[in-house]
Structures are given as structure tokens and as C-alpha cells.
Image: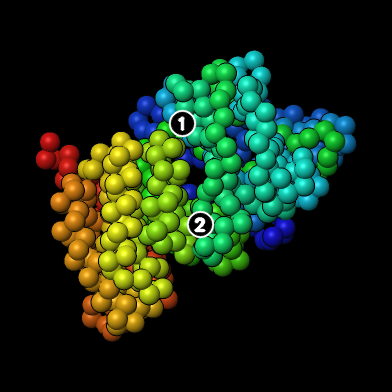
Amino acid sequence: MKCGGMMAIGIVLGLQTSMAGGNMGNLHFLDRFDNRLAGWTLNQAGGTVKIADVSASDKLELDDRSETKSVSAKTPFAAPSAKYIVEYDMCFAANNAGIFELLDASNNPIVNVSGGMKNNTLSFSTDTEPATTAAWADATYNQVTLAIDPAAKTVRCYWIDKSYSASAYNPKKQVAVKNYSGAAAAQLSFRTDSTKTGKTYIDEVKVYAPDFAIVGDSASDGKPRWSNDPSTVYRLGAAGKPDQTSPPHYQLGLLLGKKNWVANLGFGGSQSSEMASLAQTLLLDQGFRRIWIKIGLNDFNRGLSAATVEKNIQSTVKTLIAGGITPSNIFLCNCYGASMLTAAKDNERKAYNTWLAAYCPSVGINLVDNDGTITDYTVSPVKPKPAYDIGDGVHLTKAGSGQMAQNVYKLLKTARQDK
């Protein structure tokens, strides 16, 4: 997919374009470059820096036209003293480069993530450790996540792994974990390299403390209206108008309050076995403390038994609890009906839901009743209710994702009222 090769489509946003602080929630900074660059300091010595409508949304465009100078944009932010996450999307043309740096107050780099300095390669380094490299597809939108622990003086770098073969889509994968000096971060910086020319695009820049995360299948990710992976047709506009406000993670964030961010770690095609294997690297290592799991339909559609899914779920929950997650902070969804399931496969779904209704209270975790609120049992085969069905009998509309978010939020409210 070439950067900037598609007509732009504006995205309706439910959150303020740029935020700083975090006194009311865990979101410290968010910028989607909605037609403004307020708060950014621009260096345009080697070209131009502006907002560009490209690939279905407004993005920060660094247009480097010089082989001896670079262009950049940086903005201040108040780094938390506890664990925090920096996340952004980036795309640059082949033979160009895009560089992110976390800077201290004196402009010294603490963390550097460079893409394209060597073709199709990401390079991650800190102020105390040399670079580790990973595969990175040039001329494609990539997402980078940095999980920073000031107390331990460590940084974990993740990117969405295009080489992952177990799914039609892509989960995050860790590049490396590195030590750093412990210097306080004070600025976010994006720049090009002085030896390369071309355009680099940046979008969805976020800084947030790890709190709530949703992990699971395509419906947890928000497909087909949105995806956490910025390279998919659901973000680039090829599959219709993308809607950032549609996914369940976003809608739960709105219910929690506008300065609250729920992380989206879902990816299409995922199964329960992957939840067990990714629980440590994606959830515990990044520091999340409340986990929302929506999984199972892909398992049953591919012929797995309820017993197999149950074992995978037990393994996942065991890993999370052993890693310090309080059972009452785990929210596990049962499976709503989907028209893709044969009668035999749907029986496995129902058996799993029956087991889950007993299992969740037995270990003190929350059962999220998607089946009771989303499934339309007036039709055969069963599927989501008409208002919740995107039209394929499997994936959810914005209202359906909102119902999932409401199911979790009601459990949160009940828990608060019981205290």
C-alpha cells in the first residue's frame, strides 16, 4: 500500500484532538492532527511540515526536499512518573525514513525508533543501549508502541507484525526491551533524515497510562469500521468510511470519561490459544491492570470444541492472575451467535457459554453477557440482532460495539455500588 495513494475521508472524532494532563483519567496526550498543529514546534529548513488529508484521515506530513537538511515536529508533554505508553502510526515512501525520538528537556534523545534508515527495517535504541532491528515494511502504515517504566528504567518497543501467519491480520510483537538512563521525558519528536528525501506521515499519537485493554478477535478490534492496524483497508478507506468512534474500546473510553483511554489489542482471526500465548507480552508486560477479553467465535468456526476453548481460557486467566491482575479486573465475554456457525458448531458455542457462566463466578472474574444482549434467537441460524449486525451475520455495527461496551460498564458500575 503506497503512502498517500487514496482519497482522504474525514473521521468523526469523539475526543478532543489534543489533550495534555491526565488529572481526570489515564490519557495524557492525544493528537489526530485534525486540521491544526497547535503546540507543535516545526523545523522546515529542509522542506515543509503541515496537515495533509491522506489515506482516509488528516495526518502530520513531513515533506523532506533536501539531501542535506531534515524537517521535524516536536511537542512538549509531562511524562508520568509511573508506567506509560507512547503509541503512533507512521508511513513513509520507499527510500525515505521516519524517526521518532523521546527527548528530555534539553533535547537529548532518550529513545529512538527509526524506520527506513535501512530499507524495510525498524531500528530501536535508547540513550544507554544500542539498536535492535526488526522487519518493517516501507511505504506501508505501521504502528509503533513504546511501553516505558520510569521506575525500572526500561522501554519495551512493539510494532504490528506483518509477518504473522496465524491470522488474516496482525497482532503487536515485541521488538526488544531495553534499559535507559531514567532521564525524564519532556518532548515527543518526529523527524526525517538529512540524507533522504520524500514524505513521511504520522497519525494517532497517544500517550497514556496502561489501565484498561481489550484483546480478542475482529469484533473486539472494531472491524469492519475500524482497526488498530493502520495498514488495513478499514483504516485506509478502501472498505468504506473508517469511524474511530465505532470500536468497543473507544466507546468504553467515552463511558469512563473523555480523558480515559482503553487500549485496543484485538486483531482479526484470533483464537483463544493466541490469548493464552499473548497474555504475558501484550498485557502484563505493558502494565495493563484491567483486561477485557472477547474471543471464541473463530475457534468454533474452525471446528474447535468447547472443551479446547475452555482450557485456553483457563490458561489465559491463570497467567493474568499469576501476573498480578485482580480477578475482579478481568472481564470475559461469552459468545454471541453468528450465522457462519453450523448447528454443530453453534452447539459448541452454547456449551462454552454454559461452562463460562459457572466458571467466571468460581474464580471471581466478570462474565460479560454478549449472548444475552446481542444474539437474535428469533432467526435460524442465530446471529446478532438487526441493529447490531453489520450485514454479514458476524461483525457488529457501532451500536453493537456500544452494547458490548455498555455490558462492561454496567459491571463496573455494579462493582462500585457494591463497595
Q: Residues within 10 Å of mark 1 (few under 14, many from 20)?
A: many
In the rendering, at what x and y percent does residue 133 appear?
Answer: 67, 40
Q: Name the residue that disc number 2 marks.
A: 227
For image coordinates 78% across by 35% down, the residue present is 193
Given this view, does label 1 or label 2 mark the residue nearer the observer?
1
Res. 415 visible in picture: yes
Q: Earlier in the sequence, mark 1 or mark 2?
A: 1
Give the quadrant of residue 247.
bottom left
Res. 34 visible in picture: no
Give the quadrant of residue 159.
top right
Disc 1/disc 2 C-alpha distance (Å):
22 Å
For image coordinates 61% across by 39% down, the residue present is 36
- Foreground of the two, 21 or 165: 165
Q: Name the residue that disc number 1 marks.
A: 84
Q: Residue furthest left?
A: 418
For image coordinates 81% across by 30% down, the residue present is 45
Residue 284 located left or right of residue 186: left
Q: Residue flagged by tag 1: what amino acid is it?
A: Tyr
